[in-house]
């Protein structure tokens, strides 16, 4: 099995079309078909089938594509290690994150990183959790900045800081002056659920059950900035990261509420694939990220994690 065969099968699995796969690989559709056919002949199994106009992988194809991805990753790691050793490669880095973090946090991280490593070719990819993990496993991104912990095979997690989740209300809200409320009071209010992150949403739901808060969900929204505007207009209350709303609170456009019985904390960190060779550019980003008290404007709104370290799943 050649690397070109692996790349062809991955393209078919992701795009479902010989023409689209050929466009990605800069080949003709017959050439891609020939590579898949050679791979099927070697494996002795049919690797794809037609479902209407789309190509879908068979069980054998789904199994094979995982090995193909691993082969490509090992190849790319080997080439990267040799190029670094010979000084040929200046370094490249692909960082993934969600839309809100890409606006509020990542620009400051990248400015600090590029100030120390100006020759690195750096690209930022945003998306939802599922697409980011698909990109991480396929090698399209090197790291993801997101909430921890997550489940996944062969992943390393590096916690950076922890932050409090707080309830937000409009400045004229009757409860705003007290700052502390009961779960029973909050249960009477329309609630806008932050649905951006699987980790955050699961934490919010668990927290609500633990404190006896039954949210009356009237909206679900995956954009924190949009939720803040909805709350300002009095359309509901919500639970968002303190670092996300602190500027609004200082400007007086939002007010904070906390439960008297318990607080909810989450963790932000970096995730990358477990590998025998971590590229220099990736190691450098990890080092800069851990210097967050120096570059993060919201540093006073988050907390250091004692004894934080790398977690391998």
Image (spheres, rainbow, N blue to C red):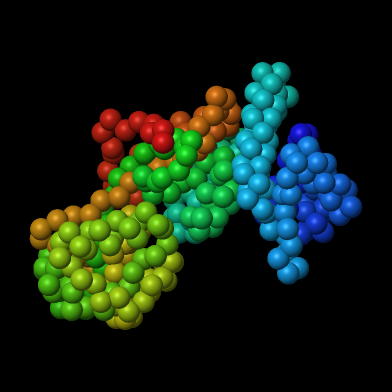
Name the one closer to the observer, 303 or 9.
Answer: 9
Quarter in which the N terminus is drawn: top right
Measured from the top left, where is residue 151 in percent x and y?
A: 41, 45
Quarter in which the C terminus is drawn: top left
Judge from the rendering whether residue 299 lies leftward or rightward of residue 53; answer left or right. left
Measured from the top left, where is residue 299 in percent x and y?
A: 33, 45
Name the one closer to the observer, 48 or 90.
Answer: 48
Number of numbered discs present?
Answer: 0
Residue at image point 11% right, 68% down: 182
| 215 shown above or below 96 | below
| 49 shown above or below 148 | below
Name the one closer to the observer, 304 or 222.
Answer: 222
Measured from the top left, where is residue 111 in percent x and y?
A: 52, 43
Measured from the top left, where is residue 174 in percent x and y?
A: 15, 78
Residue at image point 28% right, 62% down: 205
| 151 shown above or below 99 | above
Residue at image point 15% right, 65% down: 212
Asked if residue 264 shows in the view, the reply is yes
Residue at image point 45% right, 54% down: 101
Question: In the picture, residue 100 is in which quadrant?
Answer: bottom left
């Amino acid at each position: 099995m050649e690397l070109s065969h692996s790349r062809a099968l991955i393209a078919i699995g992701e795009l479902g079309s010989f023409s689209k796969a050929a466009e990605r690989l800069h080949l003709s559709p017959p050439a891609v078909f020939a590579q898949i056919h050679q791979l099927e002949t070697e494996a002795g199994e049919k690797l794809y089938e037609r479902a209407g106009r789309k190509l879908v992988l068979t069980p054998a194809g789904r199994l094979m594509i995982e090995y193909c991805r691993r082969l490509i990753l090992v190849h790319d790691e080997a080439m990267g290690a040799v190029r670094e050793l010979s000084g040929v490669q200046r370094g490249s880095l692909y960082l993934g994150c969600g839309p809100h973090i890409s606006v509020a946090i990542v620009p400051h991280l990248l400015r600090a990183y590029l100030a120390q490593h100006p020759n690195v070719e750096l690209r930022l990819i945003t998306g939802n959790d599922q697409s980011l993990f698909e990109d991480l496993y396929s090698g399209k991104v090197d790291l993801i900045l997101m909430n921890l912990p997550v489940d996944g095979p062969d992943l390393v997690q590096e916690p950076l800081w922890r932050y409090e989740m707080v309830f937000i209300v409009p400045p004229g809200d009757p409860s705003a002056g007290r700052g502390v409320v009961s779960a029973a009071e909050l249960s009477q209010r329309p609630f806008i659920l932050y649905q951006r992150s699987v980790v955050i949403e699961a934490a919010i739901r668990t927290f609500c059950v633990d404190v006896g808060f039954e949210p009356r969900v009237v909206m679900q929204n995956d954009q924190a900035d949009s939720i803040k505007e909805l709350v300002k207009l009095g359309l509901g209350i919500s639970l968002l990261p303190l670092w996300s709303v602190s500027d609004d609170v200082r400007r007086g456009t939002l007010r904070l509420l906390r439960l008297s019985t318990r607080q909810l904390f989450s963790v932000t960190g970096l995730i990358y694939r477990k590998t025998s060779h971590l590229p220099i550019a990736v190691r450098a980003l990890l080092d800069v990220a851990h210097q967050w008290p120096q570059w993060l404007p919201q540093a006073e709104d988050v907390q250091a994690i004692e004894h934080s370290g790398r977690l391998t799943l």
